[in-house]
Amino acid sequence: MNRTVLALIEAEYRRYRILGERAFSQLEGEQLVDGSEHASSIATIVWHVTGNLESRFTEFLTTDGEKPWRNRESEFDRREASPSEIAEKWDRGWSVLLDTLSQLSDDDLACEVTVRGVPLNVHEALLRSLAHAAYHVGQIVYLAKSLRGQDWEYLSIAPGQSEAYNANPVLEKASGYTSASVGLP
């Protein structure tokens, strides 16, 4: 089974998953659920990303990506959740995605799927989904950095470290961005 392109797409998804995890792992429980009238909490974003991934990638090739059982609006409700509940929810969505991707080959990229009744090639649906996940991971990182302030542990190149990083640019390919390379167990 040829998985050259899919392996690259999967590696990018994994990179964003790890970025999100590294960001919210720096926070305390209350910080994860703190939001405002105009800004979602990290917990809310996690619920939304998970709902999206579960809906899009359950029976990915055979059913519409917007499942009738998904209640998208409820994903944005304010909620109380422990750090372990948030991590569990996050893992659930990413597991559905990664399980589905592992079953696809590059031959599937030209197949057609639908999202909200709109036909897309698999590669279009994957690019849209990857961009959506990256967008929300960026929100998580921004919120976490704002909440941590001066105690923030940089997830990429820390200020003043560009020259050192450029001497060993290990994170330029998604395949280099593993749990081990970023200090996760």
Image (spheres, grey):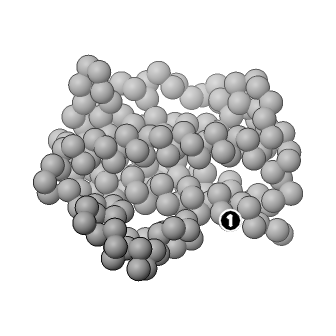
**34 w.r.t. 144: above or below:** above
Element type where label 1 sits in the image: helix
Identify the image quadrant of the C terminus: bottom left
Which residue in the protein does label 1 denote? 7
Q: Nearer the viewer, residue 27 or 82?
A: 27
Q: Nearer the viewer, residue 26 or 98?
A: 26
| Rendered residue at 20%/56% (across/down) | 152
Q: Nearer the viewer, residue 97 or 19?
A: 19
**13 w.r.t. 136: above or below:** below
* Whole-percent x, y for residue 133 in the image: 52, 44
| Rendered residue at 55%/68% (across/down) | 173
> Would residue 35 be visible to someone looking at this image?
yes
Q: Is residue 56 left or right of residue 1?
A: left
Dot 1 amino acid type: Ala
Residue reaching furthest to the left: 150
Q: Is residue 8 left or right of residue 40?
A: right
* Whole-percent x, y for residue 54 in the image: 58, 42
Count of all numbered marks drawn on residues in the image: 1
Specify few, some or many for label 1: CA neighbours under 10 Å numbering under 14, 14-19, or 20 or more: some
> Would residue 84 be visible to someone looking at this image?
no
* Whole-percent x, y for residue 139 in the image: 37, 40
Identify the image quadrant of the N terminus: bottom right
Q: Is residue 107 left or right of residue 39?
A: right
* Whole-percent x, y for residue 40 in the image: 32, 30
Q: Is residue 130 left or right of residue 26?
A: right
